[in-house]
Image (spheres, rainbow, N blue to C red):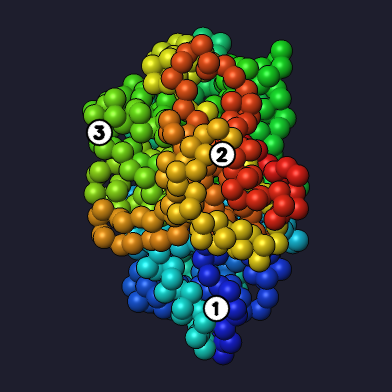
Amino acid sequence: MPIRVIDARPFEGQKPGTSGLRKKTSVFMQPGYLENFVQSIFDTIGGVAGKTLVVGGDGRFFNAEATQIILKMAAANGATRAIVGQGALLSTPAVSCIIRKRQADGGLVLSASHNPGGPDEDFGLKYNVSNGGPAPEAITDEVFRRSAEISSYRILDAENIDLEQVGQTALGDMAVEVIDPVADYQSLMESLFDFAAIRELFASGFTMRFDAMHAVTGPYAKAIFEDALGAPAGTVINAVPLADFGGGHPDPNPVWAKPLYDLMFSGDAPDFAAASDGDGDRNMILGRDTYVTPSDSLAVLAANAHLAPGYKAGLKGIARSMPTSRAADRVAEHLGIGSYETPTGWKFFGNLLDADMATICGEESAGTSSNHIREKDGVWAVLLWLNVLASRRQSVKQILASHWAQFGRNYYSRHDYEAIDAADAAKLMSDLRDKLRTLIGTAIEGMSINSADDFGYLDPVDGSNTESQGVRIEFDGGSRVVLRLSGTGTVGATLRVYIERFEADPTQHDLDPQAALSALIAAADQFAEIKVRTGRTQPDLMT
Ligand code: VG1
Ligand code: CO
């Protein structure tokens, strides 16, 4: 089959953000746009000749077409083998699992994760390296540089191949293996958790609802929760991946998964509920009458992980992204193990996991995972919760209350101001950075500011430095407010304000979080002038 070398002209702005390149679908569908970016990745990693790549995505609009283009480009660039999920589907954690298990050289994940999908919504592509994790910044920076000077790309002139049938096929000289997207991942989960105990839990009448949000986790959740663990049919809802996710945002939080959230606070609530995002790496955990914040979930899972067979030897360390609440640090201290604070984005956990310094990692944005792969993993988090519930035989509410009684409660909330003017957002942040020094020692809302800085991260493993990862304002007593701009949006800018207050007194553990944090929220608005500068009277989203 002929290989075509197509002349290319660089597109502006092919700069990967927190997690890959995300743009409007129409931008990605422009002739040559995807192709330029893929060729820039291949060029950056020294070509793909002789290599094995894993390819798959979350099923959103343009997923199948983009997969065919990537496969033809991989073949034209000399790749030996491509491993593709049936129907071009693979969750992000499954890609990470398969890269590691089959010793592939890397993987391409077609997803814009929690962003909505469809012709007028978002598309994305991320590259994962041979440890199964997101490409580190040194690579993504180089991909961007390369995209600005690209002059041609290579693609095989061939018909699309059938990705609906599991089995071996070929594209030119490249072998293509179409695999069951679930099997490898499921067997990894079976090696980590006590499936027999969880089966018994379901057999004893324990009820659960899992909302796959019309995204990629549906097939995984059905196979694992219903078929393998015996949860009744119908436990998993919205289980068929749709190109537009049913018109919603596949973002598992109290706003975008509101029906599930409301169910758990109603008389019909099952014992346990969970949801996952577009590409299956995020999770939301709910109990009857209980919402578990992602930060608390990380802390509870770390404190109880030893109850699952895969973690019975204990943890080496716990890592969290900087804006994530410090609840997990208290667990690490109690266990006498290391705790690490990294910039936002899973790529920063890779070195800590590879070096066996951290076993469990998490982000406030509903990402939790461990050293079993190098991505966050929604179904894994749900299974670990189920394993803990099967072992402790208490409700989610009881487990959370006893966790707070032991460790204290870190009240926590994130306020997002979405699609604000990018220049206004940048100015808000730069003006705030400029006055950080003058804030130290002053008092706002009756609380005095202890420290104020812009977070920079020195990777303890490879010594790389990452600057300007978010402004931190810390008050007496350990309360804090963090502000940063999102790196995953596609329209304007999103300002994220993270608010945290520690409360040791168990009689004060049942407050409404927004009320418990109200003084800090008011303080943030004063020093960052959020309302005045964004023109918004309230956040678009509070998680
Ligand atoms: C957000 C989250 C971050 C997460 C990233 C990718 O990034 O805050 O914690 O790692 O999304 O998650 P940002 O830059 O918008 O704050 V996923 O599941 O959307 O790939
Ligand atoms: Co995701």
| Viewer-nearest of discs 2 and 1 | 2
Q: Earlier in the sequence, mark 1 or mark 3?
A: 1
Q: Secondary structure at mark 3?
A: loop
Q: Earlier in the sequence, mark 2 or mark 3?
A: 3
Residue under the image location 48 percent in, 74 percent down: 144
Looking at the picture, how far across and down is residue 288, in whole percent?
61, 17
The amino acid type of the residue labelled 3 equals Ile
Is residue 98 at all visible to an observer of this figure?
no
Rounded to the nearest angstrom, the CA distance separating label 1 from label 3 is: 45 Å
Looking at the picture, how far across and down is residue 22, in whole percent?
59, 62
Mark linked to residue 426: none
Q: Secondary structure at mark 2?
A: strand
Q: Nearer the viewer, residue 195 or 379?
A: 379
| Viewer-nearest of discs 1 and 3 | 3
Residue under the image location 46 percent in, 27 percent down: 502
| Viewer-nearest of discs 2 and 3 | 2
Mark linked to residue 36: 1
Is residue 542 at all visible to an observer of this figure?
yes
Count of marks, rendered view: 3
The amino acid type of the residue labelled 2 equals Ile
Report the residue marked by disc 2: 444
Looking at the picture, how far across and down is residue 240, in whole percent?
66, 42
Mark linked to residue 337: 3
